[in-house]
Image: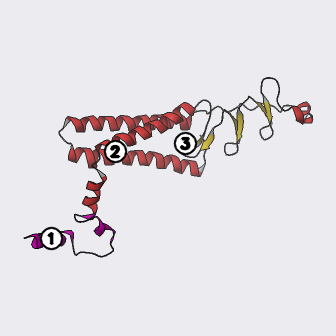
């Protein structure tokens, strides 16, 4: 775990967003609308499960070793390798990292943020405050999958966008939502429409 301020803020934001989603879905959507139905209970259970899986996979990706190449306990003499720059790679694919001064296996790369070589480095992700490498790539991909599935299940229980917009902007033609003028209140607009229809 790195003590990087940007990474710590990103982790805190990730957990805050997950908890906020849980709160909004449970206490603003499911409990008031689907309080006593089996449908509401099922969606509450699914939501809690996905949030738990998101937090679990995010924690695994954040706090576990991504595949750091171990640093040597004492300095290694690379004079024979560094003199022969044309052959930087030996038969097994091992190379020498100029920044770490250590041998690294094939497909390992140096992370400039962690200042270490990581096996099968994909990228350094600030949202998990860790590199995505050989040992935590599975959990990172699971985190992304669970977030995507959580978003899909949430869309299934939300009312259509037009219904939500009508709750926010009030009834009336959609064009009135875009105009900067204010009709005293949406109730006045309804009263005017009813008067003309009589």
Q: In the rendered structure, does residue 114 fall within the stretch colored magenta?
A: no
Which residue is the site of mark 3? Answer: 128
Q: In the depicted view, which residue is nearer to us: 160 or 40?
A: 160
- Image location (x, y in percent) of residue 103: 78, 30
Q: Residue at x 87, y 31 (%)?
A: 87
Q: Nearer the viewer, mark 2 or mark 1?
A: 1
Whichever of callouts 1 and 3 sits on the residue coming sooner in the sequence is: 3
Q: How many marks?
A: 3
Quadrant in the rendering for residue 152: top left
Q: Nearer the viewer, mark 2 or mark 3?
A: 2
Q: Is residue 184 shown above or below 163?
A: below
Q: CA distance from mark 2 to mark 1?
A: 34 Å
User: What colour scheme was applied to this rendering of the protein?
Assistant: secondary structure
- Image location (x, y in percent) of residue 95: 79, 31
**In the rendering, which numbered label is found on residue 193?**
1
Classify mark 3: residues with Cα within 10 Å, few (<14), some (14-19) or many (20+). many
Q: Quick one: quadrant of the C terminus?
A: bottom left
Q: CA distance from mark 1 to mark 3?
A: 55 Å
Whichever of callouts 2 and 1 sits on the residue coming sooner in the sequence is: 2
Q: Residue at x 21, y 47 (%)?
A: 32
Q: Residue at x 34, y 68 (%)?
A: 178
Q: Quick one: quadrant of the N terminus?
A: top right
Whichever of callouts 2 and 3 sits on the residue coming sooner in the sequence is: 3
**In the rendering, which numbered label is found on residue 155?**
2
- Image location (x, y in percent) of residue 75: 83, 33
> Relative to residue 195, is residue 177 drawn left or right?
right
Residue span colored magenta: 169-198
Q: Residue at x 48, y 48 (%)?
A: 12
């Amino acid at each position: 775990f790195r003590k990087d301020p940007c990474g710590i803020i990103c982790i805190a934001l990730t957990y805050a967003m997950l908890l906020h989603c849980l709160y909004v879905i449970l206490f603003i959507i499911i409990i008031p609308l689907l309080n006593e139905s089996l449908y509401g209970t099922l969606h509450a259970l699914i939501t809690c499960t996905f949030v738990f899986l998101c937090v679990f996979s995010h924690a695994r990706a954040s706090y576990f070793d991504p595949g750091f190449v171990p640093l040597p306990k004492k300095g290694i003499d690379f004079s024979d390798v560094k003199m022969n720059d044309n052959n930087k790679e030996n038969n097994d694919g091992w190379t020498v990292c100029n920044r770490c001064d250590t041998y690294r296996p094939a497909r390992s790369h140096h992370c400039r943020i962690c200042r270490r070589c990581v096996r099968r480095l994909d990228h350094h992700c600030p949202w998990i405050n860790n590199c995505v490498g050989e040992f935590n790539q599975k959990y990172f991909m699971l985190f992304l999958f669970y977030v995507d599935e959580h978003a899909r299940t949430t869309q299934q229980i939300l009312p259509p966008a037009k219904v939500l917009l009508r709750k926010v902007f009030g009834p009336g033609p959609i064009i009135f939502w875009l105009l900067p003028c204010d009709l005293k209140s949406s109730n006045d607009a309804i009263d005017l429409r009813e008067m003309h229809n009589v």
